[in-house]
Image (cartoon, grey):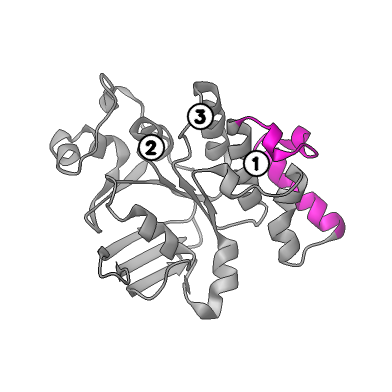
């Protein structure tokens, strides 16, 4: 790895909402270019608050967030929002145009891309998620799993540095879940996956962070963290009945 600048560097991030509720109490972690990392934690741990700081939707706390060395702040906001692509839990929050093509083109077109360059960007993004044949279809005619893949394509069309996925496996049938996993493994981007689906985290992310009560409570290989019953219990994380993380091969790190 030649570029030693982390994709994401969070240092001392603390944040309280206007009503006084303190959501983050000093979060520190760094993610290298190309890493796939899961962000785990119980409800109310501060996961959403943390994610909304990564591209400046939330600001005003203390500490720093840097994306590819650029501090998240007003000065670099347009570039930060291009580099950090967030795929929300509900694809219908991201798909609002009459056709799949228009949805995927929306971001790059707003950034000034047009003509053949824009079409190439759209085609490339749809190919990467296996949805090239659906370009002219209305998004609401697609299955939920297909809509989630198109939502990923809308973010990939911006050529981000980091792909942040909020509960990517939720509401997917087993086949759609596997297809999405194959897509995520194939992407040459840094991935931060926020999930309650611990087997999916283990399958896709060699490393996990546990966020609990507004701080990073643990950071290490996913299999090790999920096999630590005391740690899991302390942070209200539960594996599915009968699932043994020690019996699952570790997710391979990117070469």
- Give how far across and how far down residue 225 sits, in percent: 24, 39
Q: Is residue 125 depicted above or below 78 in this figure?
A: above
Mark earlier in primary sequence (1, 2): 1
Element under label 2? helix
Q: Which residue does the image show at 73% across and 45% down from the upper left?
A: 124
Q: Is residue 83 left or right of residue 8?
A: right
Neighbourhood count class around disc 2 (C-alpha, 10 Å): few under 14, some 14–19, many 20 upward: many
Q: Earlier in the sequence, mark 1 or mark 3?
A: 1
Residue found 52% across the figure and 37% down from its top: 185
Residue with the most extreme bottom position: 75
Residue underneath mark 2? 201
Measured as percent of width and height from the top left, residue 138 is found at: 74, 39
The image position of residue 49, as x and y in percent, is 37, 60
> Nearer the observer, disc 1 or disc 2?
1
- Say the numbered circle drawn on residue 150: 1
User: Is the C-beta separation of discs 2 and 3 under 8 Å?
Assistant: no
Residue 123 lies in magenta, yes or no? yes
The reply to whether residue 249 is visible in this rendering is yes
User: Closer to the camera: disc 2 or disc 3?
Assistant: 3
Relative horizontal placement of residue 100, taking residue 173 as reference (left or right):
right
- In the displayed structure, 168 sits above or below 51; it is above
Magenta-colored span: 115-143
Element at badge 3? loop
Q: In the rendering, at what x and y percent does residue 47 appear?
A: 34, 53
Which residue bears the numbered disc 3? 172
Mark-to-mark CA distance, 1 and 2: 21 Å
């Amino acid at each position: 790895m030649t570029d030693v600048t982390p994709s994401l560097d969070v240092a001392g991030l603390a944040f309280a909402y206007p009503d006084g509720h303190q959501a983050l109490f000093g979060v520190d972690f760094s993610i290298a270019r190309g890493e796939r990392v899961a962000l785990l934690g119980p409800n109310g741990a501060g996961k959403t608050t943390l994610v909304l700081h990564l591209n400046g939707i939330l600001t005003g706390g203390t500490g720093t967030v840097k994306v590819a060395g650029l501090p998240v702040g007003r000065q670099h906001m347009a570039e930060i929002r291009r580099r950090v692509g967030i795929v929300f839990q509900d694809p219908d929050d991201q798909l609002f145009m009459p056709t799949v093509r228009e949805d995927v083109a929306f971001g790059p077109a707003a950034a000034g891309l047009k003509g053949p360059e824009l079409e190439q960007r759209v085609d490339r993004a749809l190919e990467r998620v296996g949805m090239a044949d659906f370009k002219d279809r209305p998004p609401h005619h697609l299955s939920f799993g297909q809509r989630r893949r198109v939502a990923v394509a809308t973010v990939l069309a911006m050529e981000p540095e980091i792909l942040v996925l909020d509960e990517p496996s939720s509401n997917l049938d087993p086949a759609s879940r596997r297809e999405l996993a194959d897509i995520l493994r194939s992407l040459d981007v840094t991935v931060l996956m926020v999930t309650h689906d611990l087997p999916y985290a283990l399958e896709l992310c060699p490393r996990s962070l546990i966020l609990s009560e507004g701080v990073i409570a643990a950071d290490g290989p996913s299999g090790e963290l999920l096999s630590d019953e005391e740690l899991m219990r302390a942070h209200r994380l539960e594996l599915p009945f009968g699932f043994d993380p020690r019996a699952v091969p570790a997710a391979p790190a990117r070469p």
